[in-house]
Image (tube, grey):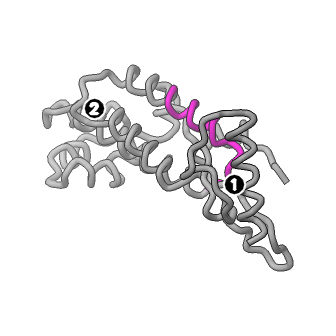
Amino acid sequence: MFTASVHYRLFIFLRDRLKPRINKVKSDIRRPVNFELLGHGFVPVYKKGVKGHYQLVVTKKSWAKIKRNLKSITKKTKPMSLTERLERLNQVCRGWMNNYHLTNIYAKVKKLDEWLRNRLRYCIWHDMKKLERKRKNLIRLGIEDGQAYAWSRTRMGGWAVAQSPILKITITTSRLKRKGYRPLLDYINNTQTSIW
């Protein structure tokens, strides 16, 4: 009851004296777990002996948005060269990670990074198109001729191939880095600071 009266008096003061536009949906008194601002939210810290502390996290809506953006860039049918794709990807990832570098997202970013590398491998596999070209490229990447022949003619779908040893052995993270890919975890290691 007390908080509601304070909220009402504050609302009257702002409306009558300062006269800004006030969004009644966003301006409310609520618990930290129900509070979201600019894609950030709060969750309680679950540690023994720690009570009343909260961690800064990325909201579900923001996770969905970044995943949608990354998906559109790494769409296999999008007509882009690998270097263009990686440049665009690095721009989006750098901006997103700079915005959310104070949040506690290491585990989720690790999964997102793995998913992103598989998407890139899928794009590369799709761009090879023909079986003979796939075989020659696998040989160039260090696979023996017989194995390259078998792998190039696999009956697995492209997404399954991207997650299989066929591409994980050949198109490694270090090879992607040499082409210009920057893993999301690199951004975290460079920018993450403790807010407690």
> What's under tag 1, amino acid-wise?
Leu
Q: Nearer the viewer, residue 33 or 117?
A: 33
Mark 2 burial class by Cα count in 10 Å: few <14, some 14-19, many 20+: some
**Is residue 103 shown left or right of residue 86?**
right
Q: Residue at x 30, y 42 (%)?
A: 122
Q: Is residue 177 above or below residue 157?
A: above
Task: Check disc 2 and report its element: helix, strand or loop.
Answer: helix
> What's under tag 2, amino acid-wise?
Asn
Q: Quadrant of residue 86?
A: top left
Specify the label residue 139 is tagged with. none
* The C terminus - image quarter: bottom right
Q: Nearer the viewer, residue 69 or 1?
A: 1
**First of labels 2, 1 by sequence position:** 1
Name of the residue lying farthest toward the front: 16
Mark 1 burial class by Cα count in 10 Å: few <14, some 14-19, many 20+: some
Q: Residue at x 65, y 34 (%)?
A: 20
Residue under label 2, please give it: 137
Find residue 73 and report its horizontal and vertical position in percent.
36, 32
Task: Check disc 1 and report its element: helix, strand or loop.
Answer: strand
Q: Nearer the viewer, mark 2 or mark 1?
A: 1
Q: Which residues are magenta?
A: 91-106
Q: Residue at x 38, y 26 (%)?
A: 85
Residue under label 1, please give it: 56
